[in-house]
Amino acid sequence: MLSRVADSLYWMGRYIERAENIARFLDVNWHLTLDMALMQQNHWTALVSVTGDKAVYDELYDADTRDNVIRFLAIDRTYPNSIWSCLHNARENARAVRDLIPLEMWELINVFFHTVEKEAQNPQLLFENPYTFCDEVKKRSLTISGLADDSMDHGEAWLFFNMGRMLERADKTSRILDVKYFVLLPDVYDVGTIVDMVQWAALLKAISSFQSYRHQIGPITPAGVAGYMLMSRSFPRSVLYSLTEAQRLLHEITGTRIGYFSNDAEKLLGQLCATLSFRSIDDILQEGLHEFTDRLQVKVNEIDTAVFDSFFAVMEPVETETAEQ
C-alpha cells in the first residue's frame, strides 16, 4: 500500500475517534453542571486544559465562558482539534481513499461533516444544551466504525484505519480520566462524599462504561474507576485494551510476531503495553494519577511519531527482526 494512502486511512480513523471523544468531554461536563452541588463552580475552561490546548484557546478568546469553550471545542474552524475540524479532516482523508472504503462509509462521513457544519452556522441551541449535539456525534461515529468492521475487507486499509482509532482512543480515555484532576478536583471536604462519587461515576459514563463497571467491579471508588479506565483487559474503551488492540493491528500489518519488533513503533507500543500490564493501580495512585496519565500521553505521541517514521515517511527498509527488550 502507498504510504500516502495508509496515512489517509490512519488519520481518518484518528479524526473520527477524536471528534467522538471531544463530544464525550463536553457531554460529561454538561451533565455535571446540572448537578446542584456543582452549579457554583465553572468547570468549562478546565476542559480546554485537558486537551492540552489552553494556549491556543487564550489566543482566540478573551473571556473564559461556557459558550466560548463549547464553540472552541465543537465548531471553531480555526482550532485544528475541534469537532468541526476533525470531521473536515476526516472527510478530506476519506475523499482521498474513496476507492478503498465502502460507498456507504464515504456517504456517512460526508453527511456527518455537513450535519456539524449546519450546527456551526446557527449554534445557539448548541450553547443552550449541547447534549443533543454530542449524542448525535457519538452515534454517527459509532455507526461509521460499525460499518467499517462489517463491510470493509479486513486487509491493510482496515488495519491502518483501526490502528489510528485505537491509538486515539487510548490517548483520549486517559484525558477523560484526567478530567478528574483538571475539572473535578473536589474541595478537601468533598473527598469521599457523594459529590466525589458522582464525579467518578461521571467519568465512567463519559466512556459508556458505567453499567459494565458496576457488573465487573461494583462499588464506585477512585481506585476502582481509575483502574478500570486504565487497565481493564475486557472493556473496549480502556487504555490497556485500546493499546493492546493497536499493538495487534500493528503486528498484523508488519507480520512481525508480538514480543519482537521490526520498527520503533512496535518497540514503543510493546513497552507501553507491558508497563500498563505489570503496574497496579495502587502504584499509579501513589506516584500520582495525573503525573502517570501525563507521561502516558507523551508516550502515545511518541508512538504516533514512530508510526509516521515507519510507514508514512521515506525510510530505508528494516532488514532484521530483533527480540524486544
Image: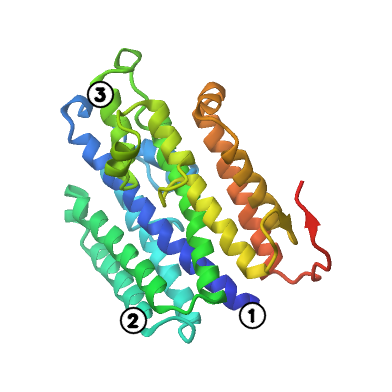
Residue type beneath disc 2: Glu
Q: Position of residue 113 (x, y in %)?
A: 33, 70
Q: Which residue is mark 2?
A: 104
As drawn, 10 above or below 82? below
Horizontal placement of 173 versus 28: left or right? right
Q: Relative to 92, does residue 39 appear above or below in the rendering?
A: above
Mark linked to residue 68: none
Could you tell whether 113 is left or right of 126 in the image? right
Q: Are marks 2 and 3 in contact (CB under 8 Å)?
A: no
Quick one: label 2 or label 3, which is nearer the N terminus? 2
Q: Is residue 317 left or right of residue 64?
A: right
Residue lying furthest top in this view?
189
Q: Which residue is mark 3?
A: 195
Residue 38 x %, y %: 23, 28
* Image-quadrant location for residue 194: top left
Dot 2: within a 10 Å radius of its alpha carbon, few (fewer than 14), some, or many (20 or more) residues? Answer: few
Q: What amino acid is at disc 1?
A: Leu
| Mark found first going from the N terminus, 1 or 2 | 1
Residue 53 visible? The answer is no
Closer-to-camera residue (207/290): 207
Quote the CA–CA distance across marks 1 and 3: 52 Å
Report which quarter residue 89 is drawn in. Answer: bottom left
Crowd rating for badge 1 (residues with CA inside 10 Å; few <14, some 14–19, many 20+) = few
Name the residue that disc number 1 marks.
2
Taking the spot 49% from the left edge, 40% from the top edge, the residue there is 231
User: Mark 1 and 3 residues: CB-CB less than 8 Å, in contact?
Assistant: no
Find numbered disc 3 in the image and state the secondary structure of the residue it sits on.
helix
Which percent across, then down, holds residue 209? 32, 45
Residue 121 appears in view: yes
For the point 48% across and 87% down, which residue is it?
99
